[in-house]
């Protein structure tokens, strides 16, 4: 077993007993990366020298350490800005962005918690994709079977945790980019409520949907990591100033009396039989634990994917206007004039998927299309959000699959973007409504052995109930204890 | 149904400041038409009485004091640019 199969609590005990040093932990990360990352390709940039230096420093402080994340190796999705550590968003546009000027707020918070940043993780370019194949660098592979994708866009973040290359990671989720990869890679991934975690220093894709979240191997560790990064930030006016609960206190309260809603639209056609069956099995587990469930309807679900692509592409077309080749990022050579400099730099710097979405978003917001498409999508969003509000009047959580199937093969959907987009149909509505949701391991395909996840959706700012629900299932099952067969640490 | 012609693609690419070749415009015309067709599912939806949602947090006009503070140095900022001179970003001439 890998040292990273221990829980946070166990690792902290080992650090304090001097059975283990931070340097050994950090070295274990880099050893595993050396052993498996040629295959998995989860990382874009490593932070080895500084990480080992920081580890040495932290080993001097261990006796004073009193927080659960102290000295723990973490990986960061490469759209989260890290001072003087190259941040690319997996785009040629930012390939030369070696010296970001500041740390994102979530990175500052991790620094305060004394985690050690191991490196920057691969993703779909500017987080636009569901397979990590649109990365400018290389596709990341699924650690359970490297013929398959890890999901996206936080594919590197999920694969690195599943592959024990880091203890945990940060990702971002605009339409399912944390939960999808977590389902495909058999790990625990939370997309927090919109407004819970600061987005300051996160390279914007679709600002009304983007949210930073946490990827771990179990629910308890996930709650520890969220506790460290959540909270109001004066630098992000969309963060909400609320009192955070202590998630650890909430975790173990059990699910007796919990009221679960199961939307019929989320178990309809297109969901594989084994995924559907796993949800039914999970509901039996919850019944045995004293919860009750009922079938409900989220009637506007079928409009979510279309609304999402209109809204997110529209916002992306505005957000990505800042990449002009002048102040930072890729700059075209041999241009004739200023406009040509913009056009050539953007044409060379952005990949196909990003350009397609910028153009789609520009069309959707242009005169003649705005009313029927962009505004219509925003109205659909109102109805989708109202569906959730209605359900949450009577129920504590919603349970559904995270992804319709297990992972697809690398290359399988690369030329079929509409199918790729539709693959996120179970995660997208959550972002449109702004509510939080987690994906936890809930089974393995009999045919391929690949994992899939159960999605638990909660009320706005009620991550505590999500964690409690997820923890109860995890304690009653063994799915999260399985691990992929890889080279490297045994 | 919204077909996006090659000419429209070229026009929109100009607005978005992205240079595309003729061949790319043809491919994009097909792909974007397909995406618009997919979006046409929204046409079934009666939204005559529905307000659009632009954000999901109930916050309005979040204000903070505008206070100057040390952020970063000019040198550091210019460092990320591929072309700068005398403390300024350098760009192609815009005046004849």
Image: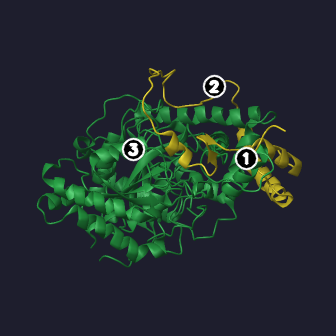
Chain letter behind tag 3: A
Write down the quadrant of residue B95 in the picture. Answer: top right
Same chain for the residues at labels 1 and 2, yes or no? no
CA gap between label 2 and label 3 equals 33 Å
Q: Nearer the viewer, residue A382 or A109?
A: A109
Find chain B in the image and tell me its colour: yellow
Q: Which residue is mark 2?
A: B51
The way the protein has been coloured in the rendering is by chain
Q: Which chain is green?
A: A
Picture residue at 45% right of the left edge, 58% below the top: A120
Q: Nearer the viewer, mark 1 or mark 2?
A: 1
Residue situated in front as seen by the camera: A405 or B53: B53
Q: How many marks?
A: 3
- A339 left or right of A328? right
State which chain disc 1 sits on. A
Please tell me whether residue A140 is drawn above or below residue A456 in the rendered image: below
Report the residue marked by disc 1.
Answer: A342
Q: Confirm whether residue A277 shows in the render.
A: no
In terms of secondary structure, where does tag 2 sit?
Answer: loop
On the picture, is B22 further left or further right than A161?
Answer: right
Classify mark 2: residues with Cα within 10 Å, few (<14), some (14-19) or many (20+): some
- Callout 3 secondary element: helix
Work out how far the residue at label 3 is from the one at label 1, CA to CA, in angstroms. Answer: 31 Å
Dot 1, crowdedness within 10 Å: few (<14), some or many (≥20)?
many
Q: Which residue is labeled 3 in the image?
A: A106
In this rendering, the label closer to the viewer, 3 or 1: 1
Q: Residue A262: x and y, percent?
A: 46, 46
**Above or below A393: residue B3:** below
Tag 1's secondary structure?
helix
Say which quarter of the image contains residue A241: top left
- Tell me the chain of label 2: B
Q: Is residue A54 left or right of residue A317?
A: left
């Amino acid at each position: 077993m890998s040292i990273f199969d221990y829980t946070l609590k166990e690792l902290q005990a080992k650090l304090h007993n001097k059975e283990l040093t931070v340097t050994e932990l950090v070295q274990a990360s880099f050893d595993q990366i050396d052993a498996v990352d040629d295959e998995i390709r989860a990382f874009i940039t490593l932070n080895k020298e500084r990480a080992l230096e920081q580890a040495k420093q932290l080993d001097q402080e261990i006796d004073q350490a009193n927080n659960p994340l102290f000295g723990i190796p973490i990986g960061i999705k490469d759209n989260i800005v890290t001072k003087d550590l190259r941040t690319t968003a997996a785009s040629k546009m930012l390939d030369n962005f070696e010296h970001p000027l500041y740390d994102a707020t979530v990175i500052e918070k991790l620094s305060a918690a004394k985690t050690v940043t191991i490196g920057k993780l691969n993703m779909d370019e500017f987080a636009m994709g569901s397979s990590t194949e649109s990365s400018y660098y290389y596709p990341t592979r699924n650690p359970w079977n490297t013929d398959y994708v890890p999901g996206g866009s936080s594919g590197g973040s999920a694969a690195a945790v599943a592959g024990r290359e880091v203890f945990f990671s940060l990702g971002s989720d605009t339409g399912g980019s944390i939960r999808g990869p977590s389902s495909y890679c058999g790990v625990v991934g939370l997309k927090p409520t919109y407004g819970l975690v600061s987005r300051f220093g996160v390279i914007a894709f679709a600002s009304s949907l983007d949210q930073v979240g946490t990827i771990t191997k179990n629910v308890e560790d996930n709650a520890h990591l969220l506790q460290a990064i959540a909270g109001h930030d004066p630098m992000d006016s969309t963060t909400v100033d609320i009192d955070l609960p202590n998630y650890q206190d909430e975790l173990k309260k059990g699910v007796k009396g919990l009221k679960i809603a199961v939307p019929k639209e989320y178990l309809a056609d297109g969901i594989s039989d084994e995924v559907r069956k796993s949800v039914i099995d999970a509901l039996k587990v919850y019944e045995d634990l004293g919860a009750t469930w009922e079938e409900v309807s989220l009637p506007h679900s079928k409009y979510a994917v279309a609304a999402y692509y209109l809204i997110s592409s529209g916002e992306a077309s505005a957000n990505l206007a800042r990449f002009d080749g002048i102040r930072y990022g890729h700059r075209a050579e041999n241009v004739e004039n200023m406009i040509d400099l913009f056009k050539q730099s953007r044409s060379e710097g952005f990949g196909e998927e990003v350009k397609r979405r910028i153009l789609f978003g520009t069309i959707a917001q242009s005169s003649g299309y705005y009313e029927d498409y962009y505004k219509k999508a925003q109205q659909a969003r109102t109805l989708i959000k109202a569906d959730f509000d209605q359900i949450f009047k009577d129920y504590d959580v919603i349970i559904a699959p995270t992804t319709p199937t297990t992972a697809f093969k690398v290359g399988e959907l690369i030329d079929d973007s509409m199918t790729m987009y539709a693959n996120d149909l179970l995660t997208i509505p959550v972002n449109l409504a702004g509510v939080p949701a987690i994906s936890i391991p809930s089974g393995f395909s009999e045919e391929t052995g690949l994992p899939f996840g159960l999605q638990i959706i909660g009320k706005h700012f009620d991550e505590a109930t999500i964690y409690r629900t997820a923890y109860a299932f995890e304690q009653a099952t063994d799915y999260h204890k399985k691990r992929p067969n890889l080279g490297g640490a045994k | 149904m919204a077909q996006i012609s090659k000419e429209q693609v070229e026009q929109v690419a100009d607005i978005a400041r992205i240079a595309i070749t003729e061949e790319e415009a043809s491919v994009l015309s097909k792909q974007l038409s397909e995406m618009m067709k997919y979006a046409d599912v929204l046409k079934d939806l009666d939204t005559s009485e529905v307000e659009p949602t632009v954000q999901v947090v109930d916050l309005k006009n979040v204000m903070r004091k505008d206070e100057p503070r040390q952020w970063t140095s000019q040198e550091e900022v210019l460092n990320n640019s591929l072309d700068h001179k005398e403390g300024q970003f350098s760009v192609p001439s815009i005046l004849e």
